[in-house]
Image (tube, rainbow, N blue to C red):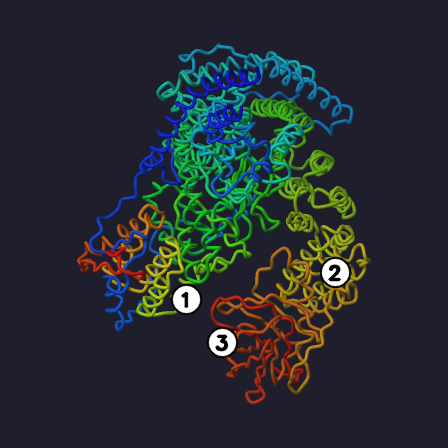
Amino acid sequence: MSSNLVKLLCGVVAAMVGGYLVSYLAEIASASKETTTPSSVVVKPTDTTEPEPVPVEPVKGVVIDEGGDVSTNDSDLAELDAEDEDSDAWGEESGDDGALVERDPNSYMPKVRPPAELKDIKEADVPEDPAQQVMPGVCSAGRNGSVERNAKRLADIYAKEEKKGKGSTNFRSEDYTPDTWRKPDVIYKELLERILGKLGNCSDEKIWEFLRDPANRLDLARISLIRKLGYEGIRRVTEQKMGSSLLFELSSDLDWINGVMFSGPTDRLGQGICYMAAIYSRYSEDLQDAVARRICATTACEFARENYSEKDMLARFAYYYKSYREGKLNVIFDTLQYWETRLVCGNLEPGGWGSPQSLAWQRDNVRLPAEGYLGACNQLVYRLRNVAGDSVFSGDYLAPILEFTKHTTAWAHREIGGVCGACSHYGAYGALASGIPAMTMGEPGHCAYVVRVGNEWKMSYSIYWQHGMHKVFWGQHDWDFLILMQDLYTERHKTMVSDHLVALAELMASRRMMKNSVNCFDAAVVAQPLNWPAWVAYAAYLKQKAPQNKDKWKEMHDRVVDTMANKFHNCAATLLSTYVYPHLLPLEPDRRARNKMFAAFFKKCKSFGTNRWDISQLLNAQMAGCRNPEEQLAYMKEALNTLMDKPDYSGAVLTWGLEFIASVAGNDAENEKMQEEFSELIIKTMSRARATKKTMDATWAALGEAIYASASNGDKRTFQAIGRLAQRKCKKMFPKNKFKFRAFPGKLVSAKGLIRTATTLSPGQMPHCCLHWAVLQKTGGNIPAKFEGTSGMTIELEDNSRLSGVVCLFGEAARRDRDFKIEVSDDGQNWQDSGVKPEVSGAVLRADLRKAAPCARFVRLLRGGDKWESSIVGFYVYGKPLKGKK
Amino acid sequence: MFRYLFLLACLLAPLAALSAHAADYQNALSKASERKPVVLFCYGANYDKVSEEKYELFVKKRKIMKYARGAIFLAVPVYQSPNEKEMREYKKVMGDAGLPGGIWSYPCLAVVDGSGNLRGIVQSADEMKDPETAGAALALIIDAYGDQEKLLKKARGASGKRQTGALAEAADMKDVRMPGNPLGNGGNTGLGSLATNATGMLEVGQKMQEMSLAEAARYMRSLIADGYYSRRQRQEILAAYSGHVRRNGGSAARLRAIYYEMRNIDPTSIYGAYAEGAIKLWVEPREAAGEPAYQPKPSTGKTALGDTKKQ
């Protein structure tokens, strides 16, 4: 029975499997057939299109070894080698004549530009209403509260509309046909009449009521568009192929026009709308899709803003639109807002990294989750010189493989390598190619990048605290502004309310309705205190209309401090120092009142905030408000007292103070006295800093920063004072070496001097700068050594001295083949060789100057070449001080 | 009874050869052997439409299985900003292990050995465009993996030049990568090192900087002749030498000869392409300007490792 069952079972299985087995065997056969055909295998890495095969020159006599080896003894190359045996042709290294493929890392940090000038709002030639020419007083707390509540309610309405329309308000109104757009003046007048009619007396209530209706918001966006472009600009668009149709479509769709007008800067908007028309004339059918409209608007506006060509803009649009249609982008892209899409589609470098070709290659070959792009930079080998020894800064680095990689920047770098610029671009543009917001950023002498993961911007490849973002909206490159932008648009409905209020304010201003305009500006910054462009526009209007109105400027100051400064210290400080202080401080004669204002700001700064920032701009702006040296001294005292208690700021404020002292240094007695007073004040303040177990690291770092600044400024007195102070307060941080070496006769004339190195210090080295001072002391310290050209180790002695010898102690045994030399100088400018060749034995370098016995105030140790040398732990100059003699 | 069971086993055996699915990564690694690596299908599970499409086709419709050569197959979902549920899903497959280094793009087919080393990968859009293309590339990797494992086994059992020869042969194999520690002796392969300095420059090139052309040529020849280097390394040595010759006034004829030699070591490699590009860029314009062209002579067939005619 059981055997029958097994037979039956086997029969069934055999019948089932048999058929499968046949097909399986056939598949195996076909698979192995395919795998044995080399042509079916794709060569790695690949492009989206079929890669061209590597052209292979017919082999003419050079032996191809099946095993991969080539002839040596008898090869033609070997003969050529032999021919050159005697020629020994040494030529000068030829210059890099190719185009640069990698930027100088020092150029990645965006240049600090002067703050943007506040622009005047142009007024129409309309009769002035005396009732409107009154500057409103300071807003009451009641009004502010009411504005906040109403703005929130309105933002909720915007959000509800969007939710109802599944991501868009879907509001359309086709009032203005393509033909009507040929007469923008007529449309403008009609819109103006309609808007002003609905706003009535422009009370707060009327404004909220007006903005609640999407039809009104559409009118507001339309009139703002005409105002930005001017009648001429609109006419230029209508002259474009399908330009009128674009204006009709754009002005009929609330989401689209809001996206153009209120999702970021609108510089060169006329050109942007012309670019949109160029896209529309080619893709009018496709532009019925909301995502296509988003890509169109953002690409066009950003390319116009960056002043890139129409051809590049069309190529970029085509890349993103096609990739989106084909489902090749990360799903993040589908739900991006307009502002975020600007960062993606408007990414920089329309050629090179941002070319459609390179983007497509990265999209297809570097497909990762958003966080994966933070490590994508490591897919490139870090190589300053390629395998043939060509520098990354020359065209020769990539040139031979450009044809193979079809001039695809990302692909070429992945094959050959790159340095920080290429690695960071590879990571950032990998994310951008997939539709994820990202950008490169400059750091001093370095390039890094950021990728947005979720709603958070994350850094990669970063080595310094200073970051200069490369893609910015408002001309501000600091990290704080990136986070501000993120927070601003995360609350996008609230921001939209604020933007609408600014649009109304500017409309009122153009109609010479100052009172209404100021009320609207006020409401805009209360509704969304992070709205940077709203603050700047408001400040511009105040400058134009009420430059002497202390109350309004003070109100603006207090509002910035109460709101923006809570999180965005750097942004608030920039706003105050650039746009508020220049007007407010001259109007405030009372020093105490001014210091109180400053203290109010610093009270908000418990730490650096989103990132370390340079406080010197703010402190300089505050100092500029002082009218005489007494006020300056009092201000500095106040600033030092306030900031020295904040561990994050103490080093920075000391550095600023020391730099200020250096800037007032002069020959006249008054400046000399002032400098002395400042120095004493700083040292006194530092002496008060406590260095308990808990605060030891912070004090050590603050003193380190300060001593570095004093060395950079050549301020020997402060350098020594800080060194001694550090030894007293942070004794544990200093080494206790007992060096054994043969000293020279005479006094140690360098112990009270100043030591400087040309080395750029990394953030990790900066806190330990007090050890530079210790290098001059008997117990020793540590200072990084860099020897390149005329850079080396320079010591300014306590006094002009007749020298007997120099001893330098390295961290580890020095190479004996190094060509060290000692130079001396009276002024630190004109140097003379001591004429003595230093002897190196282990880690000790000795230069016996007894025979030459030069008189000098400065001594420096140099070495040729640019190779690495270990750090220096002790540096001692011996001799006899020549007091009073030069 | 046993006859029937044997028959049943025989009938089912080919099914097993298709590929074996593993429950999780550790299970897959434990099942791996010299001829049966682990194939990971890694795909973007919550952010990538391309991955979803390939998962459907390759895994759900089992279109890739016939190329897996009996390897242990495992699908690994990779999540973007995963929530807790997704983290659990990933952990269910991978446990606490991370994916092997060297995966640069999803979806991909990663071939991994029993120690978790990435030994080969199919990952570009072109390679992954359909199951047939991906399958062909995968099958090549799996076959090469088996052959490479044999060579490594041979190397482990040998010493001196025999060991180095086997290792060099294993390193030269197309489509597969060497494991991190091929001899199980802490990574010392015995293969010649072309270490790079802090700026990524080959030490060979750096040494040549100090030499005359003739010295550099002798140095280059001595390196290539000792047989301790893989094909790619020999191309790199020639590249370093070519750069030195080019920057120090070497003739166009000499450059062409170097680039020919470099290309012919492996014309389909990146340095084969580099040599081709270099000829167009730095040799042909000089020849067109009248410099004597390279005149190759018929080969005697002798190479550094012997007479090719006899082999």
The amino acid pointed to by label 2 is Ile
- Left or right of A71? Residue A661 is right
Q: Are marks 3 and 1 on the same chain?
A: no
Q: Chain of mark 3?
A: A
Counting from the top left corner in percent of width and height, residue A461 is at 56, 47
Q: Label 3, label 1: how many angstroms apart (C-alpha)?
A: 16 Å
Counting from the top left corner in percent of width and height, residue A640 is at 75, 54
Q: Is residue B247 above or below residue A294?
A: below
Q: Is residue B221 above or below residue A317?
A: below
Q: Chain of mark 2?
A: A
Chain-order first, disc 3 or disc 2: 2
Quarter that holds the N terminus of chain A: top right
Counting from the top left corner in percent of width and height, residue B48 is at 51, 28
Element class at badge 1: helix
Q: Which mark is residue B207?
A: 1
Q: Chain of mark 1?
A: B
Can the viewer see residue A298 in this picture? Answer: no
Element class at badge 3: loop
In this view, the residue in front, A26 or A792, is A26
The amino acid pointed to by label 1 is Lys
Q: Tell me the mark number nearer the camera, choosing from 3 and 1.
A: 1
What residue sits right under mark 3 in the picture?
A: A817
In this view, the residue in front, B152 or A411, is B152
Element class at badge 2: helix
Q: Residue placed at 27% from the left, 66% from the top?
A: A81
What residue sits right under mark 2 in the picture?
A: A682
Q: Are marks 3 and 2 on the same chain?
A: yes
Q: Tell me the mark number nearer the camera, choosing from 3 and 2.
A: 3
